[in-house]
Amino acid sequence: MTQEQQLSFFQKWYLAARPKTLWASVGPVLIGTAMAYSDGGFHALSALAALFIALLLQIGANFANDYFDFIHGADTHDRLGPMRLTQAGHIEPQTMKRAYLLMFGLAFILGLYLIWRGGWPVLLIGIASILFGILYTGGPLPLGYIGLGDLFAFLFFGPVAVAGTYYVQALRINWTVIIAGFGPGFISTAILVVNNFRDRETDKRTGKRTLATLFSPNFSRIEYVLMIALAALLPVGLWLNSGQHPYAIISALILVPAYPLLKILFKNDCGPIFNEVLAGTGKLMLLYGILFSIGWVIG
């Protein structure tokens, strides 16, 4: 879809939400819920609330990124990624700003139920998640502009999301849950790696410092391989450490659909083809969440 095409109201906000990456919110909630269920702490209403809040937070962060990248001049007409609606002129900057504030506001309102249920730890997680969504590309020192995006994506889409989902249901936490959150954290980081690898040349020109601009292309390729491999191997480590939940290792099957994505990553230096890798890695997150959850629950 070109920038010149007219878009309907629905199309604009659908594209701005970046739906192909939203599996990064769904996967951790599935895993946290499955682990709570296995431990006898499943709470359906809390699980559903956690899912909607996670989606609202990610959509809000995507809207904020659209707005702040435009303000900082990081989005240009020659970028290779999907259309950014503010930069393309389809959505006014102030409208996008109101939209991301609305998403975060709705997430907070819905989160009041979980705060009532889980207390101050849930409040702290919620505030930190909203701040990360804004400060990733906003504020005086955006995290995504100083090479810290990978770390914070790992934390908030990984152990924070999984442990938070588990806690609001079971009202307790343990290290196994936190470590299990590393899996989706690794895959979320891989999603960001692809995004930054694709945009590295335009990011260099606009002064946006990501790991992809600070290091060689092969660094990003190796980082991507490492993230996917660690996610696949993590359930094996959990099983070997505890002797429990051996069937969770079926999540290593993500290596099969990951292979063609790796081929694209290693055979190409740039181009819109990386949008396929980005979408494919998002699907890996969903598949990982489903496989891990099924394996964990059945034994």
Image (cartoon, rainbow, N blue to C red):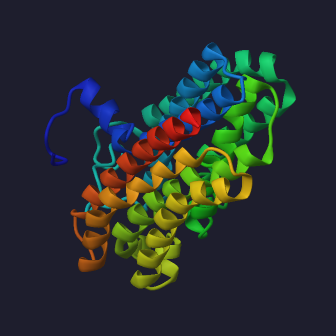
Taking 160 as reference, is 8 above or below it? above
Residue at 34% over, 31% down = 13
Q: Nearer the viewer, residue 130 or 93?
A: 130
**Can you see residue 162?**
yes
**Does residue 7 appear to the left or right of 289 in the view shown?**
left
Observer-nearest of 19 and 266:
266
Relative to 267, 31 lies left or right: right
Q: Quadrant of the C terminus?
A: top right
Q: x, y percentage for residue 244?
A: 67, 46
Residue 159: image location, x then y, percent: 67, 48
Compared to 109, does 75 lie above or below? below
23 relative position to 264: left or right: right
Q: Quadrant of residue 21?
A: top left
Residue at (61, 30) in percent of width and height: 33
Q: Residue at x 58, y 61 (%)?
A: 149
Please report the residue visible at 62 percent of the width from the left and 65 percent of the height from the top.
148
Residue 29 in view in this figure = no
Q: Is residue 146 left or right of residue 59?
A: right
